[in-house]
Amino acid sequence: MAAPIEIPGPTSPLAVGLPQRYLVLPTFELETGEVLRQVPVAFQTWGELDAARTNVVLVCHPISGNANAAEWWEPLFGEGRVLDPTRYFIVCCNAIGSPYGTLSPLTRKGGELFEDGRWVCAPHVHAPLEQDSETWWGPDLPTTTVRDDVRLQKHVLDYLGVQQLACVMGGSMGGATALEWPLCFPVRTPASRDALLHATQDDTPYVRSIVVLAASPRHSAWCIAWCEIQRQAITADTRFRGGHYLLREPPSGGLAAARMCALMTYRQPQSLERRFSRLRGKSNLAQPGESQASSLMEEGGEDITPSPNITQPQAREQYAVQSYLHHHGAKFLARFDALCYVHLSDKLDAHDVTRDRTAWAKDAQSDADVLRGVLRHLGTSPVKPHVLVLSVTSDMLYTPEEQMCIHKSIPGSQLVHIESTEGHDGFLIEYPQIQRAIYAFLAQLKGAAL
C-alpha cells in the first residue's frame, strides 16, 4: 500500500478554521469490502511521544464532537489531569461521517484530488453557498461502521509512529469505539480478525487499557428507535430531496427537529422539571457557570439547575422548555450537517461487538450468551487490556444495566457509578467524578503511575 500523505486541508466546509491536521490514505477498505480512494482523516495531537512510543492516549469523540478534544473535554485536559500533555502523547481523530474533515458526506466525492503531486482543495469547502453542482459525497457515501473508524484511526497512529496505546477512552459513541479497539487490534499487527482468540503469552498487547464511558456493547432497540425518529424528521423535510440538497438550501427544519428529539434522550424527566417546570420565557437558556466544554460536545451539556430568573409573565410566551429546545436546535444548524447526522446515526445502529463474532462464544445458547462470550475474551486473553467502565446512574439512553453487562462479562474489569440526576448528559457534566475515577484507574497501570 502506498504511503499516506499529509495535506494542509481543510477538506470540509465545517472544518474551515479548525486547528487540526489532515492525512490522506491512497486506499481504504471498508468493513463491507468496498475500497475507497484518497480518503481524508482529520486529527489532532498534544504532547510528545516518549522514546518507546508507548505513552499514547487515544480519545474517541461522541456523535457531534470533533478532533479538538482539548476544547470539548477541556475539564479533563492539562497538567495533573487525566489528559496531561506533559506525560502523554494524546491523539484524537475525527470519525468517519462527521462533518469536521474526515471522510463524510461533505468531503470531495470519490476522494481528495491531487494534480502534479499537489493536493487541490474542493471548491465547495471555502464557498459552500456558491456551488450549483454536488462535488461532495452527499448521499452516495457508502455506509460505515465503528470498526471502520478503528481501522482508519490505526492508520493515523501508524503514521505517527505509535508502538502501543497506553489507553483508549471515550464517551457515548466514543465509548463504543473504545470498546471495539482491543477487539480489532489486540496486537499491533493482527494476523486475522480473530487475533484476540489466538494471542499467546509471547505477544505484546497493543491496547494496554480502555475507558468506556456511558456507552453500550451494542445499540439497543430503544436507541435504534430514537435514531429512526430523528432520521425521519430529517428526511421528511421537503428540502432533503433524497439527500441531494445544495449546501445553501439544507433541510434545516428537519435537522433542528432531530436535534431537539435527541436532547430528550440525553436528559431525564426530573432534570427538565427541576429547571423548567411549567414556567415561560427565555431567560434560563444560559446558566451562570455552565460548562462551555460540554456545550461543544454531543449533547445539550449545560448543567440544568433551578433558575431564579424565570418568572411567570405572559401566557402567550413559549414554555421555557420549548425555548430551550428551539435554542439548541437552531444552534446545532450552524455546526452540523443533516446527511452527516443520518450517516452517524446509522453507524451507531450498526454497533454490535458480537457482529461476525458468534464463533468467539462457544456453546452459546442465546444472544446474551454470545455477548458475554465475546466480551469475556477482553478479560481472559494473554493480551487483555485493563478495563474501566463508567456508568451514569440516571442515563436513560445507554442504561446502567448495559454498563453492568460489560463489567460482568469482562473478568477483572472495574465499574464506577457516576452519580448524576442529569441523564446521559451526566457524562458531560459530572467532571470531578469522572476525573477522579479515570485518574485513579490510570495510576494503577504498571509503568503509568501518575
Image (cartoon, rainbow, N blue to C red):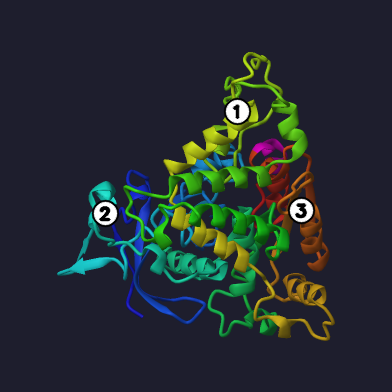
Mark sitting earlier along the chain (3/2)? 2
Q: CA distance from mark 3 to mark 2?
A: 41 Å
Pick the quarter of the image with the N terminus. bottom left
Identity, as a three-letter code, of the amino acid under mark 1: Glu
Q: CA distance from mark 1 to mark 2?
A: 35 Å
Residue 356 — which label? none
- Tag 1 residue: 290
Mark sitting earlier along the chain (1/3)? 1
Q: Main secondary structure of the magenta part?
A: helix
Crowding at mark 1 (Cα within 10 Å: few <14, some 14-19, many 20+): some
Frontmost of labels 3 and 2 is: 2
Residue 399 — which label? 3
**Residue 32 vertical placement versus 434 (above, below):** below
Say which element carries label 1: loop
Left or right side of 410 for 307: left
- Tag 2 residue: 124
Say which element carries label 2: helix
**Residue 318 vertical placement versus 325 (above, below):** above
Residue 46 position, x and y percent, is 46, 48
Q: CA distance from mark 1 to mark 3?
A: 25 Å
* Residue numbers of the magenta segment: 429-436
| Nearest to the observer: residue 326 or residue 175 | 326
Instruction: Determine the residue positioned at 53% across, 78% down.
Output: 189
Residue 368 position, x and y percent, is 81, 72
Identity, as a three-letter code, of the amino acid under mark 2: His
| Location of residue 39 (image quadrant) | bottom left
Residue 22 visible somewhere in the drawing: yes
